[in-house]
Image (cartoon, helix red, strand yellow):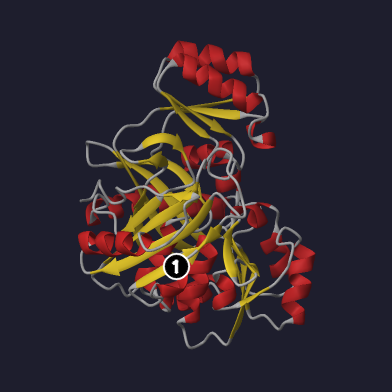
Amino acid sequence: MNILILGSGGREHSLAWAIKQNPKCDRLIVAPGNAGTAQIAQNAALDILDGDAVARFAEENAIDLVVIGPEAPMAAGVSDTLRAAGITTFGPSAAAAQLEASKTFTKEVCDAAGAPTAAWKRFEEAEAAKAYVTEQGAPIVIKADGLAAGKGVVVASTVTEAHAALDDMFGGAFGEAGASVVIEECMFGEEASFFVLSDGKSILPIGTAQDHKRAFDGDKGPNTGGMGAYSPAPCLTPAIQHQVLSEIVQPTIDEMAKRCTPFEGVLYVGLMIEETGRARLIEYNVRFGDPETQVLMMRLGGQVLDLIQACAETRLTEMQVNWADDHALTIVMAANGYPGDYEKGSVISGLEALPQDSGAMTFHAGTTAQDEQITATGGRVLNVTARAETLAAAQKRAYALADQIEWPEGFYRRDIGWRAL
């Protein structure tokens, strides 16, 4: 098979690494890719938001399967264009991608499906939103309605903080994504992520994970796109997984089909596990998480290509997931200043000495190769990932690897995995 992966982050490098393990993979192209994907695949300069350009590229290169990594091409309708051209594609339609692209759409679907989630209200004007916050009190959650690269959510501990978040969002801090906001009740408990494939009708759970959103140790500092993750998530017991599938995921998939917008792809189910032992939905993402994908791919390996292909070809009922009884943990190395302002172009050394195998991988997220050197080009730059029989062993190995990387301009948390350990 000739396979094209769209994206340039750690998620796409880990997807490429896993897909490459499958003997069915003959040629692998990543567009635009990064310095890490260039080591295992062919990188291609391509505007991944231009569906017509992607379709032409796929046809010219005899691509058998396109795997869309980030949410933006999905929301832009790239999968619709590819499917219209007869190209097998993994990723939801633009209509189905509203489950991530619009918080309001998701809430309406959940209400119609009876899926348990936080009470909510939508606003298009700052003063009305502030009045609602003052009436409800804090803590309270403020969300930009549209896509904000995983950063458009503020859990406000005071009314003043909530008002400031509303000023930021309506003031353009998140562009068009903040033109309207959704205000939710603040749920309490333990957060976890559940990943499920859907071919529009059937669903297949493929793994659990927990990530660390705050920038610094002890879950302090600003929210980020994620500073580390581990899999599996101990709090997602078999009983809770059953509840989530029967009360949240399957009703959502059924409701989407009823609306003639069947969901085909991977559903990232963000959950709050409350003290009662039941889960409520925090949010849906319509793509693999980042950095959760890195730990899932380490544990799934080459079978992920078979699963993705079956999902894209609407034959998910034929598949089952074969899990090893192991654990994986990833550490995100980020540029100093992230998630705020940071400098680009610093040189990273020591990567060539690190192992690259089924037990340990350093996935690239924001890198490029210049003059035989690896340089940092993003906020989240590397994902140092290890797999072992226990989470403690995976954690120990991952930190031993991260400590060998020479990058004074970067930082990483020292407590990834603390909650489970």
Q: Position of residue 165 (x, y in %)?
A: 54, 24
| Residue neighbourhood size for the residue with mark 1, other residues' Cα within 10 Å, grouped as few (<14), some (14–19), many (≥20) | some
Quadrant hosting residue 174: top right
Q: Tag 1: residue type? A: Gly
**Residue at x 47% of width, y 50% of height:** 410
- 207 relative to 276 in the view: left or right: right
Q: Nearer the viewer, residue 192 or 248?
A: 192
Disc 1: which residue = 350
**Between 28 and 332, the one nearer to me in the picture:** 332
Residue in the foreground of this view, choosing between 314 and 40: 40
Does the image show residue 315? Answer: no
The residue sitting at 70% across, 53% down in the picture is 76
Question: SS class of the residue under badge 1?
Answer: loop
Q: Nearer the viewer, residue 226 or 114?
A: 226
Q: Position of residue 254 (x, y in %)?
A: 49, 54
Spot occupied by residue 214 in the image (x, y as percentages of width and height) = 41, 40
Residue 143: percent from left, percent from top? 53, 32
Residue at the spot x=53%, y=57% of the render? 287
> Viewed as shown, does residue 191 lie left or right of 254?
left
* Numbered label tally: 1
Question: Left of 387 or right of it: where is 91?
Answer: right
User: What's the residue at 32%, 75% (across, down)?
Assistant: 322
Vertical arrangement, residue 42 with respect to residue 244, above or below: below
Q: Which image quarter is the N terminus in? A: bottom right
Residue 396 found in image quarter: bottom left
Can residue 203 be seen by looking at this rendering? yes
